[in-house]
Image (cartoon, coloured by chain):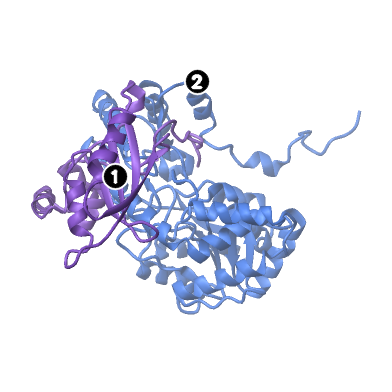
Amino acid sequence: MLNEILQILDRDARTTPEQIATMTGASTTEVTNAINQAEKDRVILKYKTIINWDKIGNERVAALIEVKVTPQRDVGFDAIAERIYRFPQAHTVYLLSGTYDLLVMIVGKTMHEVADFVSQKLAPIEGVQSTVTHFLLKKYKEDGEILNGKEEVKRQPMVL
Amino acid sequence: MTTRSKNNSLISQRAIQISPSGIRKFFDIIASMDGVISLGVGEPDFVTPWHIREAAIYSMEKGYTMYTSNSGTPELREALSRQLSDAYGLQYDPFGELLITAGVSEALDLAMRAILDTGDEVIIPDPCYVSYRACVILAGGTPVMVPTTEQDGFEISAEDIESRITPRTKAILIGYPANPTGAVLPKEKLSKIAAVARRHNLLVISDEIYSRLVYGVNHTCFASLPGMKENTILLGGFSKAYAMTGWRVGYAAANREIIAAMTKIHQYTMLCASIMGQAAALEALKSGEKHVREMVADYDRRRKVMVKGLNSIGLPCFEPKGAFYAFPSIKSTGMNSEEFTEKLLIEEKVAAVPGSAFGQCGEGYIRCCYATSLPDIEEALSRMKRFVSKYSK
C-alpha cells in the first residue's frame, strides 16, 4: 500500500489523505498513519513545488560541475561528497560512473557567484583533482514536467 | 424523368433504418463553449506510449508504407497468437484463424456480414455499445435486445437469452467489460451463456476490446470456456489497452471457416489494416505490458474517485469493474438522460453521454468516462453536485 501512496504523492504532493484513501480503497487513518511513518523513516523527505522561475523574471544561474576526486581510504567518495554537499549552494550532488566521479549542481544569483564558489570553495578541497563547469542555458523539462507550453488536448470532447 | 426505386428515396431503407448517433448535437454545443470538462469521451486520455509511436515512425522511415497481406502482417499475427496463448491458453493458428482488422469496429462489421442472412436474429444486451445494433441491421439481420438492469449489475442472464431464442436466432453478441456500463460478467455467468449457445447451436460474438481494463477481477475470455473456441468469434484490439484508438488496429479470432469468410469481405472492402498501425501494434504486444499495468493502476484510482463521488452527490452508481465508464442513475432529478446531459452541459459545462444513446435500458442513466485527469474528475464532480442539488426532487 505504501508504494501506491508514494506513487500518488510523487505525482501530486497535495493529494489529501482522504483523496488517497478513496483512490486506494484504504481508510483515511491507514493512509495518514502510513504517511506519518514514511515521514518519520525519512522515506518522504520533503514536499516541494516545481517552479518555472523564468516566468516571474527571477533570474537564477545554475551550473552542473563535473568533479574528479581521489577517493580516500575507508570512506571512498563519501567524505569528499559530504564536504561538498554541506555548502548550501550545492543543490544536488550525485556520484556517477564514467569519466568523472561527482556531479554537483550549483544554483546562484549570478554567474560570478557560481564561478567564485567553484574556484574558491569547490576546487581547493583536498582530494578534488579537477572540475569542469557547465552553465545551464535552458531548462526544457524538470521532474517530468515540461516547463514551457503544455501538451495540447488532442481528444474530441465527445466520442462514443 | 428517370424512375427511382420503389419508395423514391435516395437513401436505402437499410441506411434509413439505423438511427444517427445520439451525441451529434452535443458536438455543436461544445464547439461554442469554453472550459468544458468532458466525461464524454470513449477513449484513453493517455497518448500512445512513446516506444510504440517510435516503432511506427521507424517503420515508416524504413519505407514500410505499402499494403500488407490481407490477413495482416505475419509477425503481428504470430505475436498475437502467442499472446492469446499466454493469456488464455487459447491456440489460434496465425495462418488461418486470425485476421487483423481496422479496429474492432471493422471486425464486428465483418463478423456480422460473414454470418448473417437476411432476417437472422442476433441477441444483444441492452444497453450496449452503439455499433452492435447498427452492424446487425446493416448486415441484414434483426437485433433482438435483452434488457439488463442496474439491480443485476447490467449483466445479461442466460435465462433471458434463452427465452428469446427463435428458429431464426443465429448468434449472441456480447461485449464485456461493457461500454457504457463498465459491467464485467463473472465466469459462472459466461459459462451459462456458453451452455445456452451450445444447446441451441448458436455462435457467440464476444467483443473483448476492454479485456485488459478490469479492476480487482479477472477477465474471462469467452473463447476459453470449454468447447467454445469453435463457436466464438473473439474480437479484440489495441485501442483501449495501449491507448491506440487512432491507429485503428483490431483483430478477429475464430475458426477457419469464419475467418476465411471474414477475410473475403475484408479484402474487398478494407484490403488490409494500415501497415504503420500494424507496426505499432506489434511493438505494443512485444513490450507494451509495463505501460498497460501503469495505465490500469491509474484508471483504477480515478474509477474509485468517480464512483465514490457520484454516489456522494446523489447520483447512485453501481461499481463498474471494467472499462473506464461509470453509469450513474439520474432518476432522482426527474429528467430523462438527454435532458439531463444537455442541461448539465449548458449550465455547468460538463459533458457526459445520455444513457439512452446505448438503448432503451440506458434511459435514466448517463455515461461518465473517467479516462480523464483527476483534477478534472474532481472539478466535474463538484459542478455536477451543484447541478444535482438544484434539480433533485
Percent position of residue B312, x then y:
21, 38
Height in image: B130 above or below A58? below
The residue closer to the viewer here, B286 or A55, is: A55
Left or right placement of residue A144 versus residue A22 in this view: right
Height in image: A145 above or below B25? below
Give the residue number, with chain letter if any, for mark 1. A11
Give the residue number, with chain letter if any, for mark 2. B32
Does any portion of residue B109 appear in the rendered image? no
Height in image: B306 above or below A27? above
**Could you tell me which secondary element the residue under label 2 belongs to?**
loop
Residue in view at x 16 percent, y 43 percent = A18
Residue in view at x 53 percent, y 25 percent = B28
Q: CA distance from mark 2 to mark 1?
A: 33 Å
Percent position of residue B249, x then y:
59, 55
Circle nearer the viewer, 2 or 1: 1
Identified by mark 2, the residue type is Ser
Chain letter, disc 2 residue: B
Q: Where does the N terminus of chain B fall, quadrant-wise?
A: top right
- Asked where in the image residue B297 lies, by quadrant, the reply is bottom left
Percent position of residue B39, x then y:
40, 37
Q: Are marks 2 and 1 on the same chain?
A: no
Left or right placement of residue B360 versus residue B78 in this view: left
- The label on residue B379 is none
Q: Which chain is purple?
A: A
The residue closer to the viewer here, B365 or B304, is: B304
Does any portion of residue B361 appear in the rendered image? yes
Can you name the residue that lies furthest to the right here?
A: B1
What's the colour of chain B in the image? blue
Residue in view at x 26 percent, y 26 percent = B386
Q: Where does the C terminus of chain B fall, quadrant-wise?
A: top left
- Asked where in the image residue B334 lies, by quadrant, the reply is top left
